[in-house]
Image (tube, helix red, strand yellow):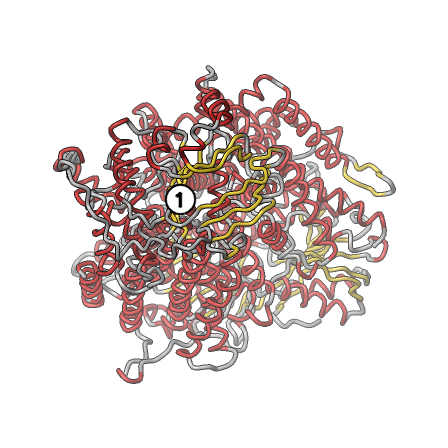
Amino acid sequence: MDFRFWLFQVMNGLTTGALLFFVASGFTVVFGLMRILNLAHGGLFLLGGLVGWSVQQATGDFTLALLAGGLAAGALGLLLEQAFTRSLMGDPLNQVLLTLGIAFILNNGYLAIWGGTPRSLAPPQVFSASVSVLGVTYPSYRLFLIALSLAAGAALWLFWERSRLGAMIRACVDDRAMAAAMGIRVDLVFAGVFTVGAVLAGLAGVLGGPVVGTFIGLDFDVLLLAVVVIVVGGIGSLSGAFVGSMLVGLVDALAKASFPQVSYFTLFAPVILILLLRPQGLFGRESDQ
Amino acid sequence: MRREALILLAGAALAALPWAAGTYWVGLMTQALIFGAFALSLDILAGFTSLPSIGHAAFFGLAGYGAALAVTRWGIDPWAAAAIGILFSVLVALAFGPLAVRLRGLAFLTVTLAFAQVAWGLATRWTSFTGGENGIPSVTRPSLALLGWDLTGPSEFYWFTLFWVVLLTLLIHRFANSAVGMSLLGIRESDRRMAALGYNVQARRTIAFVLAAAAGAVVGVLSAYYNKFIGPGSLDWRLSAQMLLSVIIGGAGSLWGPFIAGTGLHVLKTNLIGETERWVMVLGILYVVTVVLIPKGLASLPRIVRAKLWRQQPKSPAEKKPPRPAAPIRIHSDYIMGDRSRSEEPALEARGISVHFGGLQALQRVDLKVMPGTRHGILGPNGAGKTTLFNVLTGFVKPSEGRVFVHGVDITALPTHKRVGLGLVRTLQITTLFPELTAMENVLIGTLVGVGHHRNLWRRARSDRQACQAALGLLHDLGLEYLAETKVAEIGYGEQRQLEIAVALAPRPRLLLLDEPTAGLSAAETRSVLELLQRLPQDLTLVIIEHDLEVVFEIADHLTVLHYGERIADGPSEVVRRDPVVREVYIGSR
Amino acid sequence: MRNQSNSTISTGGRLLSLLLIAAFALSACGGAATATSEVPTAAPAQPTEAPTAESAAPATAAPAPTIKIGVLNPTSGNFAIFGDQVNSGIKLYFDSIDYQVDGTQVEVIYADTAFDPQQALEQARRLVEQEKVDLLMGLVNSAVSVPLAQYADEAKVPLLITVAGARAPTGPDRSPYVFRSGAANGQEDRPLGWYVASKLGLTRAATFAWDFLAGEEHANDFIDTFTAAGGTVVSQQKPPLGTSDYGPFISKVDPADIDVAYAFFAGPAAISFVQQMRQFGFTPDVTLAAPGFFTAGVLEAMGTDAEGLIQAAEYAPVLDTAENRLFLERYDASIGGEPGVYVEEGYLGAMVVAQAVAAAGDAVGDTEALLQALASVDFDGPSGRITFDDNGQSVRTIYIIRVVQGDDGKVVQQVLEAIPDVSQDWTP
């Protein structure tokens, strides 16, 4: 149990956290803004991965796969938003029923289109080797993922806090009616945010391809983790999503390494503890309860 | 009684199934009935209490495991084993429930999911004890030696299951209509209001959690005996999700919808698999169509059909409104207790109350003394801290500094509902009456506390003679009797404000705190409310927040004026209204 | 106010959502159609569901005997791939014999278990009590096989397990109604442990197996014969079921300390595992060893990361026997490409049923006769000879396989040794 061992685990945790952040950021902002719990978010993630895989098979190019995966998920997201958000507003139980129904449809639809074979994407050529970090040999693609999520987190944060559009979205989060009265086209903001969230999920599906692969069922696995992340982080909070993702990734990796004999509980037992001690999540406001 | 008879009738009709259908349908319906009752048990939590759990299968599965382990590992009689399993589940629910119900919405969903996943992990991991993912086979069914049944045949076990399911349904039905069941509906709409009426909200959420778990445990044991097998699948979140979906499809909070949906979904799924390979997608489409076409679930179907058939228009309450009684009506003094102590000790006292919200200082060392039987007005412009002071007095907000006393008893640390027990009741500024209940039922929720029947789990609340008489009496005294059978959603705003006062009187206050009782009312409506207030018994102590000077001056005999969280004046009405500081600050700011 | 605007769905929105649902519904039908056409029937004249005896035979003649077979496999959810493969193997064989065995009509009904024991039980009841099948076959995951074996025993319906390996159904308490044509958990691992230690001379091992009963059964049998042949197990790692990141477990082991790593995973998890063993510097110096299950359906996705992997498996497409050539031809003609191990296991299961039906002859309707016929099955399938031991467990040839890079750059399996007549308690 030396330093290298723990460094290794930390990097593993961060890799998982990085992937989770891409999924959870869109998930949490959509919830914060529109009060919609989109349980089909995992389906958007998987669509990205599957489309990305098909494109990589056809062209051999990872960047194209990434673009295609993001676009496909974004398009589906926009379609769902336009078709269903009106019936989604308001009743949270109906949201569960509707979005879970869509998640089942997507899951089974992917099975019909892509078949059940698990697939794996090849990482881009530049990142196919391993590098040495402080004496630890580590896949460079995973380091790239961590760096990318940091960059994406920073960019999202800047956009959120500093840009005019970000301010408009925050205004909508705080008070929808007031925002509308100030001349903000709330419907456009909703469509935009929902689509961007879907694009992020799709990108995550492709980015995760070389690490966790893409297969039927990953949609629900990822969904469960994303729910945990946003609740632990604080619902609707972007920084909460970031910290929550990294925390879930790290706690799971480090606890599995420390107590492998209880590895079934390393994810969910801390979740119970955190929520009982801090019901609103780490970054949530009391009023979000 | 009509509903109970209907349930029994449905049970009797279902009992005929083995003569009408083959063993396949008998077996299928056994499991389907189990799932129907399972969905109904979740409805107590997700529907009635608005706590959507996606880990309810934990209690279903843990009870099944408990019974199965007791039978197979320790050779205990299946009847005793069933009791062990159910008890085990209930104990776990008792330990986990009080913690979990502190959470709401998505956080509650997640914590129940996490809990069920831990239980699932335990069942899967602890192979030497639980059999791991293979589960426990050869679970022996109980026998009914008295009837000469061994319950091995499909029909016998079907009847056995039907018996328990009908019994459970009756019990849940009974519970739902009891005082506690009705209070859950209230808590779903507004937990603050229920606390302000004297209900211990957390305790009631815990009761709902534990009862739902207990009902789930009973069917969990039935399921283990029916399948003669239990495995980790019975703890899986997917099973919980299927039940939650059944509750939603059936109509959350309805008593028959979730049962039908839980039963129907299982029958549909099992047969659909024989029809199409894409059954998962078909079910998904069904869910989506349900939301789009009947967003309130199966339970709303009869209403929709009726509306389509007869095109009924809701009756306008105005048509029913009789002329107001000209003469003031005497309040039944035996119901409203008032404060007859007449001592020189203040009825309500606050000493040095300070409240900070983050950096904001909402109240600064505010003192308040309310003498028994006075009409005490608290004045101040918006943002002066009036409502915050009320929140401190009634326990919604914990003060950063200072203490609160009722008749000399320090209540600073008491939760809201316990303050009601000392006679301290408040109205809420924004009307939070329960829109789906009638005026009578709204008041009834309060009178149940007034007559001390609010903890009853068994008696139909609507048939509680004492509480109902008290409620009708109150409505009568306040001249609101004509609204008794009207749903609040159909009552006009001015009348809702009056009803609000009736509800606040229901728990038998000695001290009534009124938060802007005339806010948003027209001049005529304000007059009605004022008349009503003036008719209240003189020994009932009133504290009124108002920013309408006319109202306060007309009612209050003592005034306290707040400005930016500080008390700037206090004294008899005639003195304070002439106070130059008050005139400048208050009237100037308007 | 808000409630009102919420409950009213604009006509446009509702129309769009209903259109979308309709589109999904159409794609559902389309999906179902393509899924079934993946396995085209050999003879166009032969429908999947054989005509019933009454309609097929002239009214005067005695009705031809019919056997109805209910197939239970997961065709939705995470493990749909395995169920689809087994089902296509079953269909391939019955198609090839036109659903006729010595004058007995064969009828096959498929049902989805979705990997869920509860659903599998319900579907078994439906097949037996509603569809009146004479025999059940299939099952992929262990967890489903235990309650199903119990049900078969109660309902007195023969059950032929084709893949699921849980030991209990063919253990000492087995039901006379249960047989298994596939390998029991550990049946491949026993020869594997012995082979790795004594033939390859790799004696220091770490085991990586999912932390559940099946994982335990597999790993323990490997360890049993491995240590008996002089090997030492340095470390036993047990990641929870469903883990996809093996970093915390892999890094518990020092690659310099071992020369062989045993793995029991499947599907996407197995892909991740071989990738991570490469990334974390284990392979190629450390040899990977695993049962056949490990690469089922995912060998191509593993690619060169799987190179050097040693497996003990029930089947490999490279076997050069007449039976296997015929199987490969049929598969290539009807589906195309190379079949995975589970296609063969389904095909073999169908062959076992056909053999038993043939042996039972006119007494095929008699369950006792059918059970006896199953117990005395003895023939050569694509994967070699198969018989049953006293517990209804198959005794088969197990192949030691090495994964190597083929001429076209793709990885292929190469048979190192065939070990005949391997029982579930095999010892060298």
Q: Who is closer to the viewer here, B225 or A17?
A: A17
Q: Who is closer to the viewer here, C305 or B576?
A: B576
Q: Where in the figure is residue B200, as x and y percent of width and height?
A: 43, 56
Q: Could you tell me which quadrant the C terminus of chain B lies in? A: top left
Q: Where in the figure is residue C271, as x and y percent of width and height?
A: 65, 46
Q: Which residue is mark 1?
A: B513
In the picture provided, is B126 more to the left or to the right than B315? right
Residue at the image position 54 percent from the left and 63 percent from the top: B133
Residue A11 visible in the picture: yes
Q: Which secondary structure, mark 1?
A: strand
The amino acid marked with disc number 1 is Leu
In the picture provided, is C144 more to the left or to the right than C227? left
Residue furthest out toward the top: A183
In the picture provided, is A164 more to the left or to the right than A194? right
Q: Where in the figure is residue B415, as x and y percent of width and height?
A: 49, 53
Q: Could you tell me which quadrant the N terminus of chain B lies in? A: bottom left
Q: Who is closer to the viewer here, B66 or B436?
A: B436
Question: Does residue C81 sit above or below A32 in this rendering?
Answer: below
Residue at the image position 69 percent from the left and 27 percent from the top: A154
Residue furthest out toward the right: A135
Question: Does residue B319 sit above or below B11 in this rendering?
Answer: above
Q: Quadrant of residue B281?
A: top left
Q: Where in the figure is residue A289, as x and y percent of width and height?
A: 51, 42
In the picture provided, is C112 more to the left or to the right than A22? left
